[in-house]
Image (cartoon, helix red, strand yellow):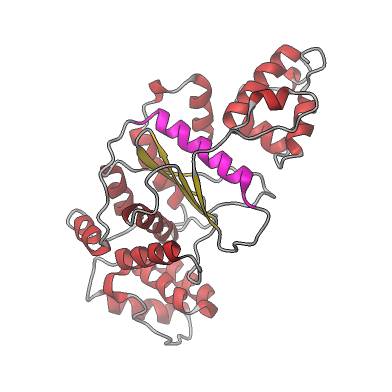
Amino acid sequence: MTQTLSMSVLYKKLSAIGLPKRFVREKGLPSWWNEELDNKPVAVLEGAGHIAQRLHLDLKSLLAENQKPQFKPLLHTKFKYHQQDKVDVPDAAHQLASRVAEVVADAIKLEFKPIPSDPHQVRSEIVAKHPQVTLYSLLNYCWEHGIAVIYFKDYPEKTRKITGMIQWQCDYPVIVLSSSRTNPAWLAFHLAHEMGHLALGHIKEGILIDDDIKQDSDDREERDSNQFAVKLLVNSFDNSLGKKKFNNAEDLKNKIIQLVQNNLTIDPCALALNYSWYNKDYFALSMKCVNLINPAKEGQKTINKFLEQHLNWDELSDDNADYLDQILGE
């Protein structure tokens, strides 16, 4: 096989399973790779090893002449699909997210401390140390409890994405968040939702994958995790604005600022998103309100900054370090 092995052959095989050439080149190969190596069989063999490791593929199937590349077997996985009958399950996406969780766990030693199942207790513990329940304070709480959190979105463009994932690795959970919306309050809700899965015992081993997070899910565990997140973020102010209509985002902002004076531990942005939860026709208005309150849109950087502070790079192989550096550098 090494006599005819070339990157063009590998690219064609990988494209057939939803991993296009550009994606493989940018995400599957190390940063030092260049096109001069594409037709050198020995170099391509090494490149195939990097691709297999980074993209969670079985190397033997990748190199086999008449075999479709296969992803490596995952741990026992619980899928949470908003549309249970969809056939295009995010296979490539959850494989890539799983690999990232593995790499992160290789570089971090944590001792997991269970989260209380009562969101009010979790909230009390957080506000004892922080002025508000926000993405930052949730991240701090997670890391203190031995829960690693990473933001990862390096999926092929046309591949069905995931929203969140929990993977037990090295005796502690790794949460992977992947929403394309990176407003801190938005990511805070997704993180609180995943925390709910852990706190309520929905996952004690293996992997749990959230295809999407929706209010109208027909999955009991999804609904329970949603409620955990809502109580954690806005406490007793859930649906406090009811069906009240607002002329513009400024009016909504003023009403929310007035409301939170009664409980300054509530992030006003969380309350704006909570309004859209019950008034879907006003989602755009709510997002404008969020931007008025806090225009920050780089919550993913906050997530991965926490991660970087806990990484022990010396524990990683050169290739894993290069791969993780590419992810965190975005």
Q: Which residues are magenta?
A: 89-108
Q: Main secondary structure of the magenta part?
A: helix
Visible residue check, residue 172:
yes
Please give the name of the residue rendered at 24% of the width and 65% of the height, measured from the top-left corner: 265
Q: Is residue 304 above or below residue 70?
A: below
Please give the name of the residue rendered at 45% of the width and 49% of the height, measured from the top-left corner: 300
Residue 102 in magenta?
yes
Q: Nearer the viewer, residue 115 or 232?
A: 115
Kindly indicate the quadrant of the structure image that contains residue 32: top right
Q: Is residue 288 above or below residue 54?
A: below
Q: Nearer the viewer, residue 167 or 245?
A: 167
Q: Is residue 103 above or below residue 266?
A: above
Residue 57: percent from left, percent from top: 62, 31
Please give the name of the residue rendered at 73% of the width and 18% of the height, measured from the top-left corner: 37
Side of 230 where 44 appears, left or right: right
Residue 221: percent from left, percent from top: 42, 62
Residue 318: percent from left, percent from top: 50, 20
